[in-house]
Image (cartoon, rainbow, N blue to C red):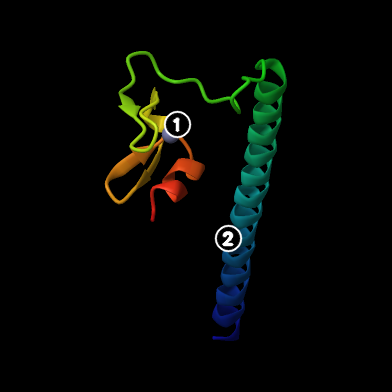
Amino acid sequence: MGKLLSWIVVIALVYAGMRLFVLFQRKSQAAALARERRAQAEAAGRSGAPHPRGGKTPAEGEKMLACAHCGAWSPASDMVAARGRHYCGVEHRDADAT
Ligand SMILES: [Zn+2]
C-alpha cells in the first residue's frame, strides 16, 4: 500500500512539473511574440514617412462633410462630431455650442 501511495506522489509531481513547464513555455512564447511585435511596430514607424497631418491619410473616396460653423469641407474622419453636427475642429464645435 505504501508503494502505491509513493507512486501516486511521483505521478502527481511529474504532472505538476509538466504543467509548470507548459505554463513557463507559454509565458516565454508570449514574451517573445510581444518583443517581435514591438520591433515590427518600431520598424514600421521608422520607415514610414511622417504625414504632415499626424500620419492620418484620408481614404480614397471618403465621405466629405461641411463644417456646421464655417462650412469648410473636410474628410469625415477629420471632423469633430457634436450634437448630431460636424465641425472642422474643436474651436468651431465650441464656438457653435452657445
Ligand atoms: Zn469650421
Q: Quadrant of ligand 1?
A: top left
Q: Residue at x 33, y 28 (%)?
A: 66
Query: To which residue does mark 1 refer?
Result: 78
Of 41 and 65, the residue lying toward us? 65
Judged from the image, the secondary structure of the residue bearing numbered disc 2 is: helix
Of residues 40 and 3, the one drawn nearer to the viewer in this rendering: 40
What's under tag 2, amino acid-wise?
A: Arg
Residue 5 picture quarter: bottom right
Classify mark 2 as within 8 Å of ligand 1 or not, answering yes or no.
no
Q: Residue furthest bottom?
A: 1
Position of 54 compared to 57: left or right? right
Q: Position of residue 48 (x, y in %)?
A: 65, 17
User: Disc 1 beta carbon < 8 A from ligand 1?
Assistant: no
Note whether 20 is above or below 1 in the view shown.
above
Q: Quadrant of the C terminus?
A: bottom left
**Could you give the CA–CA distance between mark 2 and mark 1, rounded to whole angstroms?**
51 Å
Residue on which the image places disc 2: 19
How many callouts does the rendering have? Answer: 2
How crowded is the residue under tag 2: few (<14 C-alpha within 10 Å), some, or many (20+)?
few
Q: Is residue 82 above or below residue 75?
A: below
Residue at image location 30% in from the left, 51% down from the top = 83
Horizontal and vertical percent for residue 20?
A: 63, 61
Look at label 1 and name its amino acid.
Asp
Percent of width and height locating residue 34: 64, 41
